[in-house]
Image (cartoon, rainbow, N blue to C red):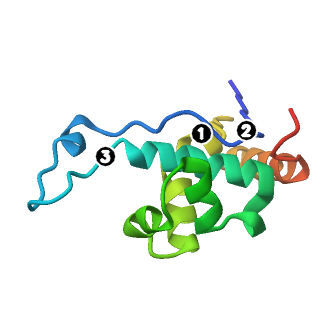
Amino acid sequence: MSQTIVPHTLPLKNVHVPARDRTATRAPGRPVNLRLKDNILAAIARVLVEEGYQGLTISRVAKAAGVSTATVYRRWPTKQAMFFDAMRLWRDDLTPQIDTGSFAGDVDELIAARIRFLARSLIAG
């Protein structure tokens, strides 16, 4: 059975943070707000949808998340690091699930899905 899912928008949902990560300990000082990363990731998605990759900046993401640029830089040293970390987290949502029953068929469907994805606007439905 061939099933092709072609995502056309970035996920704007909260990213799951495993419970073990929420209980991380650190040296004395201000406690780390581990849920803040979810907020920032949602802001990355909003900026990408509204402005595209060229418009994605640490400053815009910080403003959209309601945090300082230092807060974003504390998690990602560069725009590229921030973008690729978000893409890794969203990989399953952005990758079509294809199973045609053959490797060649899967590759053909994957290429066709990528072409359809790239031909669509991120905002269009």
Q: To which residue does mark 3 refer?
A: 34
Query: Is residue 91 among the parts visible in the rendering?
Result: no
**Above or below, comparing residue 40 to residue 58 in the picture:** above
Crowd band around label 2 with a 10 angstrom C-alpha radius: few (<14), some (14–19), many (20+): some
Q: Which residue is mark 2?
A: 7
Mark 1 lies on residue? 93
At label 1, the amino acid type is: Asp
Res 43 label: none
Identify the secondary structure beneath mark 1: helix
Image spot of residue 89 (x, y percent): 48, 49
In what element is the residue under mark 2?
Answer: loop
Residue 19 higher or lower than 116, as above or below = above
Horizontally, residue 94 falls left or right of residue 78, namely right
The residue lying at 55 percent from left, 58 percent from top is 62
Crowding around mark 1 (Cα neighbors within 10 Å: few <14, some 14 to 19, many 20+) is: some
Type of the residue with mark 2: Pro
The residue that appears at 68% across and 46% down in the rendered structure is: 46
- Residue 10 sits in which quadrant? top right
Quick one: 97 or 56, which is closer to the camera?
56
Of marks 1 and 2, which one's residue comes earlier in the chain?
A: 2
Point out residue 120 in the picture as x, y percentages from the top left corner.
89, 46
Classify residue 53 as left or right of residue 87. Answer: right
Front of the two marks 1 and 3: 3
- Of the 4 image quadrants, the one containing the C terminus is top right
Q: Nearer the viewer, residue 19 or 55?
A: 55
Which residue: 25% across, 52% down? 32
* Tag 1 and tag 2, C-beta contact below 8 Å: yes
Label 1 close to label 3 by CB (< 8 Å)? no
Q: CA distance from mark 3 to mark 2?
A: 28 Å
Image quarter in which the N terminus is found = top right
